[in-house]
Image (cartoon, rainbow, N blue to C red):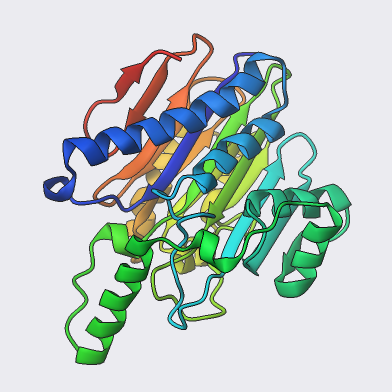
Amino acid sequence: MSICLAIHGGAGTLRQSDLTEAIAAARHEGLRQALRRGFALLRQGGSALDAVTEAVMELEDDPQFNAGHGAVLTDHATLEMDAALMSGADRRAGAVAGICGPRNPILAARAVLDLAGPVLMIGEPALNIARAANLPFEPAAYFLTDSRVAALQRELARRASGAPDTRSDADRHGTVGAVARDHAGHLAAATSTGGLTAKRAGRVGDTPIFGAGTFADDATCAVSCTGTGEVFIRYTAAADIAARIRYRGDSLATAAHDIITELSQHGGDGGLIALGPTGAPELVFNCSGMYRGFVTEDGTLHTAIHREAFCVAAL
């Protein structure tokens, strides 16, 4: 089978007028590092599940993206992170919600998946599973960045003043994710997020909800979403793509593009990446941009931010 890895660093990018050459270069390199890390496993015969885990870990470790180190803050100035992982071979799945502590939330989701019992765990019990798996933990200060603290302060001040919401897509969204196909033809999807800037404490978005923000099934597709989580949940975005392929015979491209278009009609801003049993990935969005990239069998790295052509780089 033709191996492939696609990633996103969140729909909702900086405005093009604010995106300096230096910032753009750093974002592209962050995406490339995640592609390199995940693709190295695929090339060595590793599983799609391991590849998406590694790619998302790289994005969680990069403070440029809203997951792990660099996650956004709630309206109570707390950190509540969600992550999910699903195997297309057997639909094994694991997710965590509302946690802070594990250095890589996606590994906490992997620990839940490996239990082969519960699918979604929250709060302290989820942290206990991570501890039992001997995952690295970090203090809350590790995850904080000056830019996320400033974004929270701006949004809280705006709300207090009663000023209209003029936030950019970059302030509204933010998630990281990966989908992969390995040599055996198996698919997998992983997603991780800090949520929305100044989200209501306790709010959980689409990331850890299987069929909404994350989904994988070898017969149809693997999907990772980013955007207005509540809308993606209500319209079961990821599962609907798979259903259109399975029951209506839609191509991956048609299903992915149609879903993103339809979500926009219901207030669902954002995007998704999707990969089928064969062929190239689909990376689609309906907002200002989406940090995204993919790498296929030949090892060429493709990354993009807005609606420009993909930047191409060697592995």
Q: How many marks?
A: 0
Q: Is residue 252 left or right of residue 131?
A: left
Q: Residue at x 28, y 45 (%)?
A: 289
Q: Residue at x 16, y 41 (%)?
A: 20
Q: Is residue 242 above or below residue 312?
A: below
Q: Residue at x 41, y 36 (%)?
A: 30
Q: Is residue 4 left or right of residue 231?
A: right
Expressed as whole percent of the image width and height from the top left, the position of residue 23 reads 25, 41
Q: Is residue 285 above or below residue 170?
A: above
Front residue (pair 143, 176): 143
Whether residue 250 is visible to the viewer of this picture, yes or no, is no
Residue at the outermost left position: 17
Q: Is residue 118 left or right of residue 182?
A: right
Expressed as whole percent of the image width and height from the top left, the position of residue 5 reads 54, 27
Whether residue 93 is visible to the viewer of this picture, yes or no, is yes
- Name the quadrant containing residue 132: bottom right
Front residue (pair 313, 131): 131
Expressed as whole percent of the image width and height from the top left, the position of residue 245 reads 56, 37
Residue at the outermost top position: 298
Expressed as whole percent of the image width and height from the top left, the position of residue 13 reads 28, 50
Q: Is residue 191 above or below residue 196?
A: above
Instruction: Pick the quarter of the image with the N terminus.
Output: top right
- Name the quadrant containing residue 263: bottom left
Q: Residue at x 59, y 61 (%)?
A: 82
